[in-house]
């Protein structure tokens, strides 16, 4: 890949952080991360290896995923056991799907809204 501008490098870094968080913390496969970001598993691998640049649409999706990561970290105070329990619990607000499935289906904003509403009611 050609030399990137500082902005492009920063975008690549954010996308790689989002992919890393989704694969390590959420334990999503490349295909599931691709679903979350609206891309193929092949694109995810290429972005992680810095072989290709994501489009602006994919950068925005990765930034929304990082915002969700921060919100989850705040809501669950780094309690991974509680976080994983919540991620695997079917919720009526998500049509009885789990938050994890909704994320993998690209419904990041809906999960963020459910989380924000839950936090507001506590």
Image (cartoon, rainbow, N blue to C red):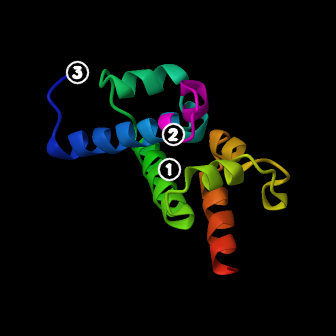
- Tell me the magenta residue range: 24-33
Residue 88 locus on image (x, y percent): 73, 46
Residue 53 location, quadrant: top left
The residue positioned 80% from the left and 56% from the top of the image is 91
State the residue in front, 49 or 26.
26
Instruction: Give the labeled residue for mark 2.
Output: 22
State the residue in front, 8 or 71.
71
The residue positioned 39% from the left and 21% from the top of the image is 46
Secondary structure, mark 3, is: loop
Residue 26 locus on image (x, y percent): 57, 40
- As measured in the structure, the alpha-carbon distance from the residue carrying label 3 to the one carrying label 2 is 25 Å
Secondary structure, mark 1, is: helix
Is residue 74 one of those drawn in magenta?
Answer: no
Residue 18 locus on image (x, y percent): 43, 42
State the residue in front, 24 or 82.
82
Q: Earlier in the sequence, mark 3 or mark 2?
A: 3
Please determine whether, in this image, residue 112 is positioned above or below residue 6: below
Q: Label 2: few (<14), some or many (≥20) within 10 Å?
A: many
- As measured in the structure, the alpha-carbon distance from the residue carrying label 1 to the one carrying label 3 is 25 Å
The disc at residue 1 is 3
Q: Label 3: few (<14), some or many (≥20) within 10 Å?
A: few
Is residue 27 one of those drawn in magenta?
Answer: yes
Q: Earlier in the sequence, mark 1 or mark 2?
A: 2
- As measured in the structure, the alpha-carbon distance from the residue carrying label 1 to the one carrying label 2 is 8 Å
Q: Say whether marks 1 and 3 touch (CB < 8 Å).
A: no
Please determine whether, in this image, residue 71 is positioned above or below residue 29: below
Q: Earlier in the sequence, mark 1 or mark 3?
A: 3
Please determine whether, in this image, residue 38 is positioned above or below residue 3: below
Instruction: Give the labeled residue for mark 1.
Output: 65
- Left or right: 9 with respect to 102? left
Quadrant in the picture for the N terminus:
top left
């Amino acid at each position: 890949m050609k030399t990137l501008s500082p902005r492009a490098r920063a975008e690549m870094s954010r996308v790689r952080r989002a992919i890393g968080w989704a694969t390590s913390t959420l334990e999503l496969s490349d295909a599931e991360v691709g679903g979350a970001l609206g891309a193929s598993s092949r694109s995810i691998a290429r972005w992680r290896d810095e072989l290709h640049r994501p489009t602006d649409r994919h950068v925005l999706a990765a930034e929304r995923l990082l915002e969700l990561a921060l919100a989850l970290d705040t809501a669950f105070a780094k309690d991974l056991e509680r976080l994983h329990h919540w991620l695997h619990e079917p919720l009526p607000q998500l049509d009885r799907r789990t938050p994890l499935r909704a994320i993998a289906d690209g419904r990041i904003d809906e999960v963020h809204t459910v989380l924000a509403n839950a936090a507001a009611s506590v």
